[in-house]
Image: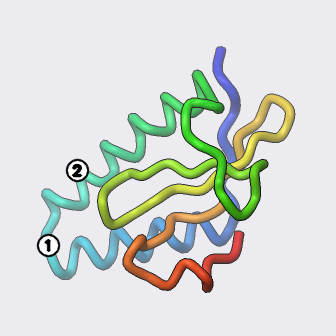
Amino acid sequence: MGYAIYWSPVAKNDYINILEYLNSHWGQQEVTSFISRTDKTLQLISANPRLFVSSAKKPAVHRCVLTSQVSLYYRINNQNIELLRFWDNRMDPEKLIY
């Protein structure tokens, strides 16, 4: 059995904002595609939490590139995965807080 995944309030908000943006600018097919990609990635993370690289700013935080525009930041806590942020890679990385 894999690690349990928990969403921080900020990660939930980021995810919802991305889905709303995709729906309003690109349509339902892109929303469905992003949800599917996220679900598959979360399964990978649950099975092997150290699969993705550690963040340069904080080594305890891992970064996974979901799409060329969006990265997922998460950390491992015992047998749990905490999703911290869904980050738009086009934004200023100095403003990234997790």
Say what amino acid the circle numbered 2 marks.
Answer: Ser
Q: Position of residue 13 (x, y in %)?
A: 55, 73
| Disc number for residue 94 | none
> Which residue lies under the disc numbered 2?
33
Q: Residue furthest right?
A: 78
| Residue on which disc 1 sits | 26
Q: Quadrant of the rendered structure where residue 49 is?
A: top right
Q: Residues within 10 Å of mark 1 (few under 14, many from 20)?
A: few
| Residue 18 falls in image quadrant | bottom left
User: Where 13 falls versus 2 (above or below)?
Assistant: below
Q: Residue at x 69, y 33 (%)?
A: 4
Describe the element under mark 2 as helix, strand or loop.
Answer: helix
User: Left of 61 or right of it: where is 47?
Assistant: left
- Which residue is pictured at 30% across the width and 78% down the height? 21
Image quarter of the N terminus: top right
Res 69 quadrant in image: bottom left
Q: Mark 2 or mark 1, which is nearer the start of the sequence?
A: 1
The residue lying at 59 percent from left, 64 percent from top is 85
Residue for point 43% across, 76% down:
17
Q: Where is 41 relative to 69, above or below?
A: above
Residue at the outermost top position: 1
Q: Quadrant of the C terminus?
A: bottom right
Tell me which amino acid carries mark 1: Trp
Left or right: 11, with 68 as reference point: right
Q: Label 1, label 2: how many angstroms apart (C-alpha)?
A: 11 Å
SS of the residue under disc 1: loop
Q: Nearer the viewer, residue 82 or 65?
A: 65
